[in-house]
Image (cartoon, rainbow, N blue to C red):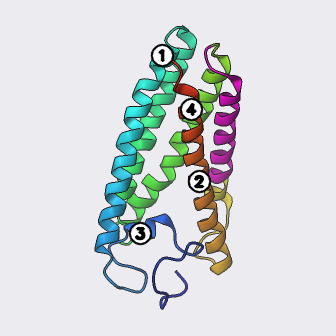
């Protein structure tokens, strides 16, 4: 953002969304990266829709857990749609729509993580360590949503940009590890 002469993607100074831009920050075409970014987020969004559509079935033995899980899944569907929307709205062409989708990924999954933390904690068929994993996921997203709303604007200066970019990378890493952790926990359960 502050170094128009930079070549390539800089891990600490480029948001993930920069890979999905129509043109790079220095004005060069970014078509291949944009297509790969859009395709990847669409696949991730569709995968999460499939993942969360089956998840409530694991808790159908308890009416309250099943109901809470359904609400968590509805919120996950919203987050998944926002993942797809983020990929399909290049930040350099439709910034407002892109920001809407990108921020609401985390708002939706914040609710999902909170509700599934409760469900897993209440469940007698899954180990409590998996509720702690989801609780960590919830707290991570909660902190990141705080950064989104109260952190310094990335447009302020290079230090603020790095803070926002690195925060984004950390929450995505927490997201990946949380899904992996929960998948191990759910793999032994039968719907």
Mark 4 lies on residue: 184
Disc with the residue nearer the chain's start (2 vs 3): 3
Q: Is residue 69 left or right of residue 133?
A: left
Q: Which residue is mark 2?
A: 173
Q: Which segment did they paint magenta?
A: 125-145
- Image quarter where the C terminus lies is top left
Which label's residue is closer to the chain start, 3 or 4? 3
Q: Which residue is mark 1?
A: 190
Residue at 33% x, 63% y: name it: 36
* C-beta proximity under 8 Å, tags 4 and 2: no
Q: Which secondary structure is most common in the magenta stretch? A: helix
Q: CA distance from mark 1 to mark 2?
A: 28 Å
In the rendered structure, does residue 131 fall within the stretch colored magenta?
yes
Helix, strand or loop under label 4: helix
Distance of mark 4 from mark 2, alpha carbons? 17 Å
Residue highlighted by disc 3: 19
Query: Seen in the image, is 80 located left or right of residue 109?
Result: left
Tell how many labels: 4
Q: CA distance from mark 2 to mark 3?
A: 17 Å
Q: Is residue 47 above or below residue 62?
A: below
Label 3 and label 1: CA atoms lie apart by: 39 Å
Against 45, is 55 above or below?
A: above
* Residue 182, x across and y down, in percent: 57, 33
Residue 172's spot in the image, x, y percent? 56, 54
Q: Quadrant of residue 38?
A: bottom left
Q: Which label lies toward us, 3 or 4?
A: 4
Relative to 150, say whether 81 is above or below: above
- CA separation in Å, label 1 and label 4: 13 Å
Is residue 60 among what the camera can see?
yes
Tell me the quarter of the picture where residue 47 sits. top left
Q: Position of residue 101 (x, y in %)?
A: 43, 53
């Amino acid at each position: 953002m502050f170094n128009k002469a930079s070549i390539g993607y800089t891990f600490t100074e480029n948001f993930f969304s920069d890979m999905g831009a129509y043109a790079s920050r220095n004005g060069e075409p970014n078509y291949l990266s944009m297509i790969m970014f859009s395709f990847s987020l669409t696949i991730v969004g569709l995968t999460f829709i499939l993942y969360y559509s089956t998840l409530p079935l694991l808790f159908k033995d308890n009416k309250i857990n099943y109901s809470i899980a359904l609400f968590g899944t509805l919120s996950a569907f919203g987050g998944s749609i926002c993942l797809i929307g983020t990929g399909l709205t290049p930040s350099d062409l439709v910034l407002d729509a892109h920001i809407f989708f990108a921020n609401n990924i985390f708002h939706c999954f914040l609710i999902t993580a909170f509700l599934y933390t409760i469900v897993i904690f209440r469940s007698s068929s899954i180990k409590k360590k998996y509720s702690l994993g989801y609780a960590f996921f919830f707290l991570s997203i909660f902190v990141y949503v705080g950064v989104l709303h109260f952190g310094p604007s990335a447009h302020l200066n290079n230090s603020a940009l790095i803070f926002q970019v690195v925060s984004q990378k950390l929450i995505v890493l927490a997201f990946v590890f949380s899904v992996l952790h929960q998948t191990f926990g759910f793999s032994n359960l039968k719907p």
